[in-house]
């Protein structure tokens, strides 16, 4: 009897949710104007745009100086006299190590292009391989690091393999739905060949910047041996490269999600109501008025998302250890608060309405919370699966450069291999973000108006609605279980305090 009441109440909730979604969408469109409306476009988060531009100009100068100082002549610019007190200088040359980074750039670009080329026919299989192979690959690299007596890196890769294994085990029941969502996102992207060309263009742009970055990094590798100063400088350069790569990936994210959103809203890319030159407008807004918001969001979003996935995986496997559960719950609620201000769904709002990053993130999260779609978003692991593919691509890239480095200079393997891995992750990530953009747009459209998804793919709409219904039922059951548990504990405490 209680099960039937729970089922009917959940069904009523979904029905009310659908009505609220339709009303909410109409109100938001009325308030915010049409997508890509020039009147709603203003420069957002200009401070962070300025910081990013200054960072790029300053870093470009530093990289050029570091590379030239060891190019064809040791200490060409006479910089070593300023560094003798901090680290041991070594008479290496930039051109000794630059080709190793060229291999990383070539392999990363090749893997990204292969991914885009196979997107329509083999993408689902490639994502499954990424999920199941990554743990083994990390374990093998860990063994190789221990064999080379690199105990710190061997331990780091071993921990990474263990965390990856535990995460996959914790979300194994979610993978069928995740693969379904990814398959539909691939279907959407494959019908928009122009967004694929955008991804190719941004990969080439990133490769050009990596040419400059690796020139300076090669100069750093050549400058000294066995000192912390060189490592710290490479860490700073790697953080800069990560931010730059994230900015370019999220720029593609904004462009692609804007296009996908419009296609879902208007029913078809050839629809007469579709705004003219949609792709060029999306591209122009992404690199002008919205670029500051992209720079700002790129600083924090990736780290917070990764932390959220790991905490959710650990939280689901804790069991009845109340002390540990209390600590994890505290971290969980802290990260959930941060997610409200830094989430990938903000980029869809940025693409469509041109709002600032924090407001876009809050609007997207409040939309999910008010419609109940957040339960579906939390259940989906598509972002984590795509990240696994990105990490696997980076590991393959780092391995290729690392093997060549080991043949020539065994003491430089970890240094070159780790930075080459970062280069590969960024290049492969530029290909992966095309699918992730489609996933985020699908969820935003489903929250705005489920009928948009039903018009595009009725079977997929039914599967999403059924999964949402199940997740809402599950959350209701968990909430009742927690309330019952707390009530029983309170009664027990009262009986101990006031015995009859």
Image (cartoon, rainbow, N blue to C red):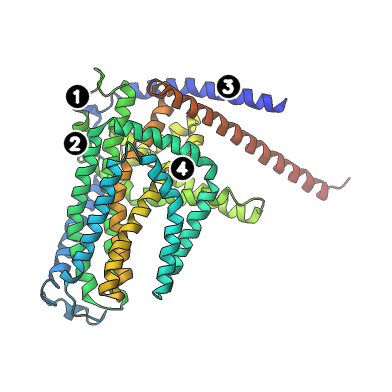
Q: Identify the residue shown where x is 18% and y is 58%.
A: 211
Q: Give the residue pinned by disc 1.
A: 276
Quadrant, the N terminus: top right
Tag 2 or tag 3, which sits nearer the N-term? 3
Answer whether labels 1 and 2 touch (C-beta < 8 Å): no
Q: Give the residue pinned by disc 3.
A: 12
Q: Nearer the viewer, residue 150 or 447?
A: 150
Task: Identify whether 482 is placed above or below 107.
Answer: above
Q: Identify the residue shown where x is 53% and y is 27%.
A: 466
User: How crowded is the residue under tag 2: few (<14 C-alpha within 10 Å), some, or many (20+)?
Assistant: some
> Farthest top residue?
272
Q: CA distance from mark 3 to mark 1?
A: 40 Å
Q: Nearer the viewer, mark 3 or mark 4?
A: 4
Q: CA distance from mark 4 to mark 1?
A: 34 Å
User: How crowded is the residue under tag 3: few (<14 C-alpha within 10 Å), some, or many (20+)?
Assistant: few
In terms of secondary structure, where does tag 3 sit? helix
Where residue 175 appears, x then y in whole percent?
49, 41
Q: Give the residue pinned by disc 4.
A: 381
Q: CA distance from mark 2 to mark 4?
A: 31 Å
In terms of secondary structure, where does tag 2 sit? helix
């Amino acid at each position: 009897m209680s099960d039937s009441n729970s089922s009917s109440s959940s069904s009523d909730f979904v029905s009310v949710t659908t009505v609220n979604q339709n009303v909410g969408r109409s109100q938001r469109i009325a308030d915010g104007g049409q997508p890509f409306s020039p009147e709603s476009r203003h420069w957002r988060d200009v401070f962070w745009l300025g910081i990013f531009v200054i960072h790029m100009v300053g870093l470009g100068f530093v990289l050029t100086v570091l590379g030239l100082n060891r190019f064809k002549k040791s200490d060409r610019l006479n910089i070593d006299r300023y560094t003798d007190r901090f680290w041991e200088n070594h008479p290496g040359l930039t051109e000794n190590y630059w080709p190793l980074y060229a291999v990383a750039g070539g392999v990363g670009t090749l893997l990204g292009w292969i991914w885009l080329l196979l997107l329509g026919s083999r993408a689902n299989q490639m994502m499954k391989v990424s999920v199941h192979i990554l743990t083994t690959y990390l374990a093998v690299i860990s063994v190789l690091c221990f064999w080379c007596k690199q105990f710190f890196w061997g331990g780091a890769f071993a921990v990474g393999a263990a965390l990856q294994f535990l995460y996959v085990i914790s979300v194994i029941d979610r993978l069928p739905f995740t693969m379904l969502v990814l398959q539909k996102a691939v279907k959407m992207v494959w019908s928009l060949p122009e967004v694929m060309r955008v991804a190719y263009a941004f990969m080439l742009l990133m490769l050009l910047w990596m040419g400059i970055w690796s020139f300076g990094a090669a100069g750093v590798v050549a400058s000294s041996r066995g000192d912390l100063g060189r490592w710290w400088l490479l860490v700073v350069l790697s953080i800069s490269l990560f931010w730059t790569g994230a900015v370019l990936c999220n720029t593609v994210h904004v462009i692609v999600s804007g296009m996908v959103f419009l296609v879902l809203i208007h029913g078809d890319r050839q629809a007469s109501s579709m705004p003219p030159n949609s792709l060029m407008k999306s591209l122009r807004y992404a690199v002008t008025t919205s670029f500051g918001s992209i720079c700002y969001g790129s600083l924090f979003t990736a780290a917070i998302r990764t932390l959220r996935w790991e905490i959710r995986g650990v939280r689901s496997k804790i069991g009845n250890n109340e002390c540990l559960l209390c600590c994890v719950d505290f971290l969980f609620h802290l990260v959930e608060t941060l997610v409200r201000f830094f989430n990938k769904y903000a980029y869809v709002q940025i693409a469509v309405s041109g709002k600032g990053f924090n407001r876009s993130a809050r609007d997207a999260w409040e939309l999910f919370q008010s419609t109940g779609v957040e339960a579906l978003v939390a259940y989906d692991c598509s972002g984590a699966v795509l990240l696994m593919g990105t990490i696997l691509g980076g590991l393959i890239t780092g391995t290729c450069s690392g093997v060549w480095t080991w043949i020539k200079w065994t003491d430089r393997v970890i240094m070159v291999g780790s930075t080459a891995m970062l280069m590969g992750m960024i290049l492969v990530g530029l290909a992966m973000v095309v699918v992730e953009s489609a996933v985020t747009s699908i969820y935003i459209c489903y929250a705005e108006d489920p009928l948009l998804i039903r018009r595009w793919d009725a079977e997929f709409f039914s599967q999403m609605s059924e999964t949402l219904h199940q997740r809402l039922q599950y959350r209701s059951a968990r909430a009742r279980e927690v309330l019952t548990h707390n009530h029983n504990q309170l009664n027990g405490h009262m009986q101990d305090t006031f015995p009859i």
